[in-house]
Amino acid sequence: MARYLSIVENAYRATVEEQDDTAVWFTHTMRNAGADVGLLLRGDAVNYVLRGQDASGLRFGASEVRVAPEIDKDVLAMVQKKVPVYVVSEDLSEHGIPEGDVMAGIERVSRSHLASLFSEYDRVFHW
């Protein structure tokens, strides 16, 4: 069976119309269909691993998001289903996210080890 890694770099993609990040939802759906998947969060998407985040009041220009996304809960559901969820350590630091605010079950990976991580998967999607 092929292994798939989804890399999510841009946060809150498509959350004006939907309450989920499309790439996170797609990866979770693949898992629910029986695929062997992993999720790597980097760049602005490292915000998804913050415990207890509150995205109410989220706006994109003049467009208000009326039903705030709860992507942290989506990520936690993946962890609970034993989906490996990775986060780039340096991106956490650069975004000022303290280690104690990261939800349990998230695996840290340094930028210098990304190539090694990619080699563990047969297909890599970059969203």
Image (cartoon, rainbow, N blue to C red):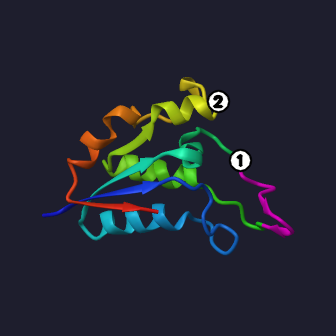
Residue at 17%, 63% in the rendered image: 2
Mark 1: amino acid? Asp
64 horizontally vs 127: left or right: right
Q: Which residue is mark 2?
A: 96
The answer to whether one can see residue 54 in this image is yes
Relative image position of residue 105 (x, y in whole percent) = 40, 36
The residue range painted magenta reads: 54-64
Which quadrant, please, contains the N terminus? bottom left
Quickly name the residue at label 1: 54
- The image position of residue 118, as x and y in percent, is 27, 48
Left or right of 10: which side holds 119?
A: left
Q: Position of residue 104 (x, y in %)?
A: 45, 34
Query: Which of these two is toward me, 21 or 7?
Result: 7
- Which residue is located at x 46 percent, y 31 percent? 89
Q: What crowding class fits label 2: few (fewer than 14 Cα within 10 Å), some (14-19), or many (20 or more)? A: few
| SS for callout 2 | loop
Depicted 58 relative to depicted 53: above or below: below
